[in-house]
Amino acid sequence: MMHHMDSRERFLAALSGSTVDRPPVWLMRQAGRYLPDYREVRKGAGFWELCHSPELTTRVALEPLARFKLDAAIVFSDILVVPEALGLGVTFGAGEGPQLARRLEGPADLSAWKVEGAVDRLKFVSDAVKHLKTALAGRYGLLGFAGAPFTLLAYCTEGGGSDDFLKARVMLHQQPALAEKALGILADVTAQYLEAQCEAGADTVQLFDTWGGLLDREDYLRFCVPAIRRITEPLHAKGRKVMLFVRGGQHLLPVLGEADVDGFSLDWRADWREARTRYPKHVLQGNLDPALLLAGVAPVRAATSALLRVMREADNGKRCIVNLGHGIHKDTNPETVAALCDEVASHG
Amino acid sequence: MMHHMDSRERFLAALSGSTVDRPPVWLMRQAGRYLPDYREVRKGAGFWELCHSPELTTRVALEPLARFKLDAAIVFSDILVVPEALGLGVTFGAGEGPQLARRLEGPADLSAWKVEGAVDRLKFVSDAVKHLKTALAGRYGLLGFAGAPFTLLAYCTEGGGSDDFLKARVMLHQQPALAEKALGILADVTAQYLEAQCEAGADTVQLFDTWGGLLDREDYLRFCVPAIRRITEPLHAKGRKVMLFVRGGQHLLPVLGEADVDGFSLDWRADWREARTRYPKHVLQGNLDPALLLAGVAPVRAATSALLRVMREADNGKRCIVNLGHGIHKDTNPETVAALCDEVASHG
């Protein structure tokens, strides 16, 4: 057993593949509606207003760190800031999910995207990173993030949420050149946007491909992988590390290595051992079922302990980060989140 | 090249693993809202009214056979007939999806299920099978179907549609004994219900596990597989064949063999070659992306032709049935469905 590490030291060690006292832990959507202070903040501020206030984003990002034994913070923002910066008019209706005023249907819609200045219009997010970085005072890891290009394309074509995002899937086959061009623009803006988050103090960035799992391997390889590489290549040239989460992407695992990312955040349905065998040198993150957090403390403790055992099977738990396999559900009792984090800490 | 087969001969040959002139084809949701005559029928009849009329169910089931070169019909019904027969009060609101009046939350709810007589209350479905069988006059294959136990449990616990069916996933970990008991009841009723459909003339039956893909392998093995085996065992004892479709179940492929079914209907994201290698002696069905049917005739023809080539790679295309990897979307142009079927027929 090595010396006890502090949270940021542990998080950076897991990212770089050095020895850790135990795997670090952070949780997707750890700052969210399940927390009373977050709901309090949202009573007084609309979603965009919250995102644009460094004080408020830092406040909501810090709350879970104060409550739970977490090792990293993630900047509070949304993946749809990029389409908004491109001029697509994103609004969040009460309880209704996002709406985009200007859908991408054909080449004329793409020509109307306001690419020039888009990265500048995203400065409020790196400002939020900078503000949070100062508040963390070097004690915790810090993540930036962005939506992966296909997931952004899915919202741009659909004009809002969906469960099958058929419009984007149809576009890939009906207007493949248009889809590729749009994915390229989204990727290039995202690359600069993520570099700005790294410059502002993010220790790593995560790409959320929330809807990439709707595609088969062939389409993912053809459309998504090249777009992700347009992000990872410039970031790697600056020495940055990029994590990739593909929700429902268990079937894509054999091709995700082509995306040239540094680690994968695994969906709760992915098999950890299989992923580790396939990617022995990648950082792996995940992948507890968020439903467990609604089932009670005992199932959470048992599953967390089992995951930590599986993590230790290969290379003594190097390159492992404990997380969920999807975001925390709004009806989650914070007690179960505490139990998860306590269980991880007890394995140190 | 062998002699030209008629549709039912071809369908039965594919099911039994004998030589075929070409793989047969049918399509999930081939009788549905994308067809004008179906919409016409629905103008005059509510959903339950349609399901209870042998004349109307036969009319809508026959329409796609008259239009397209399909090899099999599927009885028109719904997977929620089983919860309705158990007394859960299923209604279909206009455009809103199904609602169940009596949700399953605890043991008392389960005790209130009207198990006695449930199979008798499902007689209208085997009547529909019988009526359709007569109309088909031996020329086409005929499928019966039911919801798989976990998918039914998902609706029973949620009380309607959902995209994550968290209540059922929580129940598996919070009240596992209750979940197992409910799954057992659903399985036993389904087994008798499917046997009645076979006696009425169905050549095979398909279990739709629309939401099974929400579970990881461990949960699927623990909860779903034993319930499915309670269906396949009595049906196999009568010489029946059972197909299983698990939507989003690509990651479950390594464990689905345990369910002891005769064939798998593959999601559009599953890799056909991988499934064939893993299950060389099972019937495999699928798995074109339904989004292609919205993309136009050319992409449909290309993908169908490519699938038929892959099917022929192993054992000259035995035990293969062309289908989609999910149901036909309501906005589909019937022309693209015709193109799919024509392309399959041209490979004879």
Image (tube, coloured by chain):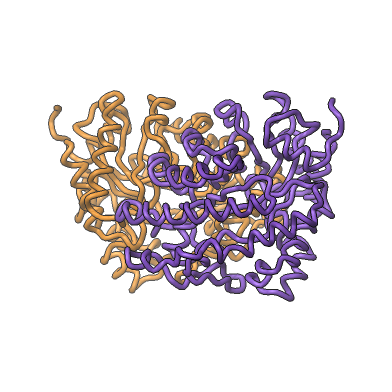
Chain colours: A orange, B purple
Instruction: State the count of labels.
Output: 0
State the residue at coordinates (71%, 44%).
Answer: A173
In the image shown, does A310 or A178 lie closer to the viewer?
A310
**Residue A111 seen in render:** no
Judge whether B174 appears above or below B1 on screen. Answer: below
Judge whether A99 appears above or below B234 on screen. Answer: below
In the image shown, does B276 or A193 lie closer to the viewer?
B276
State the residue at coordinates (70%, 53%).
Answer: B74
In the image, is B174 to the left or to the right of A91?
left
The C terminus of chain A lies in quadrant: top left
In the image, is A214 to the left or to the right of B128?
left
State the residue at coordinates (83%, 33%).
Answer: B348
The N terminus of chain A lies in quadrant: top left
Q: Position of residue A294 (x, y in %)?
A: 31, 57
Figure quadrant of residue A167: bottom right
Q: Position of residue B232 (x, y in %)?
A: 52, 43
**Residue A239 seen in render:** yes
Q: Position of residue B308 (x, y in %)?
A: 74, 33
Figure quadrant of residue A315: top left
In the image, is A170 to the left or to the right of A212?
right
Determine the residue located farthest toward the bottom in the rendered image. Answer: B44
State the residue at coordinates (31%, 59%).
Answer: A332
In the image shown, does A272 or A243 lie closer to the viewer?
A272
